[in-house]
Image (spheres, helix red, strand yellow):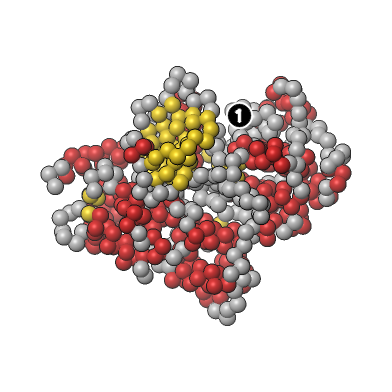
Amino acid sequence: MGNKGNKGNKNKDLKEIGERANREDPNTFHYSNTINLTNDIIVAQSKADPSLDYKKLNFLGEGSFAAVYRVQNRITDSVRAMKIINKSSTCSAEDDKEIFNEINILRTLDHPNILKIFEFYSKRESYSIVTELCSGGELFQEIVDKGPFNENYSAYVMFQILSAINYCHNMKIVHRDLKPENILIVERDKNSYPRIKICDFGTSKMFEKGAVQRKLVGSSYYIAPEVLKKHYDEKCDIWSCGVILYILLSGRPPFGGDNDKEIMERVAIGKYDIQSAPFNKISKNCIDLIQKLLIMDPKKRISAQEALNHPWFKDHKSKELFNQIKDESTLKKLLANLKAYKRDSIIQETALAYLVHNFPQMKDVVNACKLFNQIDVNGDGKINKQELLKGLQSKIKSDTLAQDVEQIYKNIDMDNNGYIEYEEFVRAAVSKERFINENVLRFAFRYFDKDGSGEITFDEIESVFKESVADKNKVHESLSQIIKEVDTNGDGIISFNEFSDIMKKMLKK
């Protein structure tokens, strides 16, 4: 216990990370040791050696100054992807800025078709970013290997892409480099169409409605004509979606050339072939959607939400193509979990959020994700009451569903915004007893135990929650109560055994 003072100083350093949020220094990034339990994604940050937490399994690929490995967590055995970026002479300040920008962006995004980020390590010689593993590789390689694709396949993939982009735009984020190389396939399955994840948000940007972007970013084949003029908004992503759809169906880009200059000259003109094969055999609604995605004037170009509502997706029943839960007992169990869900103490709730986010392959989490996708019919990445009621009515016969939905919203929608977000829904739908495992709980404990001492101090808990409640006095009061509830021996710190006991009480409810 004699090191409590030193430990407090270490935590003071951790708090300062959040205070550097808006600096332009590329050696800092907007990381907050806090979580808004309805919106924010927990991203653990550390200056430790990532090899202490992960062991490398095999090499996956590399770029100019980065290598990607399949890795395994030493506590939970979870298999993930780790990108290791060397801080060498080839890694410029601009590259650094993109890295931190991507971390900042991904922390705010909560959508089933956007790559999950788990941890970020910053060492003197390298950065390491840990994300979920998408073993199916890039959509680009899928096109090279198997394309062109039929309309059913293309509709399934495009619905997911547009759903993610619509969500980003609603969150005031424009991707700016959307292309098949930045779209990952979760896993290859011969019996179903692929689930995809959008990645690489390094050049993405927050925007205000009506604000004009002027930086020339993107890739030649997919860049929108207004970007070339350095006068554009979020609609540039919609153009890229049009190019991707064209490529999925034909196996070739609409604007080709021998070099970037030629390609962009043709993009600027905006003329493309929609008459010859295979487009002469493609449905009128599909052609109509392509043309609306590739309108030269961004003001006249269709939005992501309008695209999702296009008749072409209804024609191909894109939502029904998702792997659906057909077992009624599984659906009833998920519904029972949603009805029974209630918020516990802030430390319990945050630990649960952290675990749900970090175990996306757990069966209950997978099923909850499937149900969310089935219910989110408009693809906006969130569920309102009407969607939830209608979605459950189509799956479960019950005279009390309307009352059940009201109860679910009362328990889950704590910010009263009228929506249940993706991870918020999943967290409420899973069977919590699945997490009653010493290794899993120890993994959650380490999120709070910032210095790895085996004890959680008041300062460490405060560093996690300081910004999650508007009234700072209430935060302090709440945290004091947490210590009293969890610290059973009254020594002012939380041991793993004490943490484990309180988590088991919640998880067994």
8 displayed left or right of 120: left
Q: Quadrant of the C terminus?
A: bottom left
Residue 408 visible (yes or no): no
Tell me the SS state at disc 1: loop
Q: Nearer the viewer, residue 368 or 243?
A: 368
Residue at the image point whose x is 52% and y is 30% from the top = 62
Asked where in the image residue 253 lies, by quadrant, the reply is: top right
Residue at the extreme bottom of the image, as rendered: 399
Residue at the extreme left of the image, as rendered: 2
Identity, as a three-letter code, of the amino acid under mark 1: Val
Residue at the image point whose x is 44% and y is 26% from the top = 86
Measuring from the top left, give residue 218's x and y in whole percent: 62, 31
Residue at the image point whose x is 71% and y is 50% from the top = 153
Q: How many marks?
A: 1
Residue 371 visible (yes or no): yes
Measuring from the top left, give residue 408's x and y in whole percent: 49, 69
Q: Eyeballing the image, is 185 above or below 480?
A: above
Q: Eyeballing the image, is 22 above or below 304?
A: above
Q: Nearer the viewer, residue 72 or 387?
A: 72
Q: Eyeballing the image, is 247 above or below 312?
A: above
Measuring from the top left, give residue 124's x and y in whole percent: 35, 27
Q: Nearer the viewer, residue 163 or 326?
A: 326
Residue at the image point whose x is 29% and y is 44% from the top = 450
Residue at the extreme front of the image, as rendered: 57
Mark 1 sits on what residue? 217
Residue at the extreme top of the image, as rendered: 89
Q: Residues within 10 Å of mark 1 (few under 14, many from 20)?
A: some
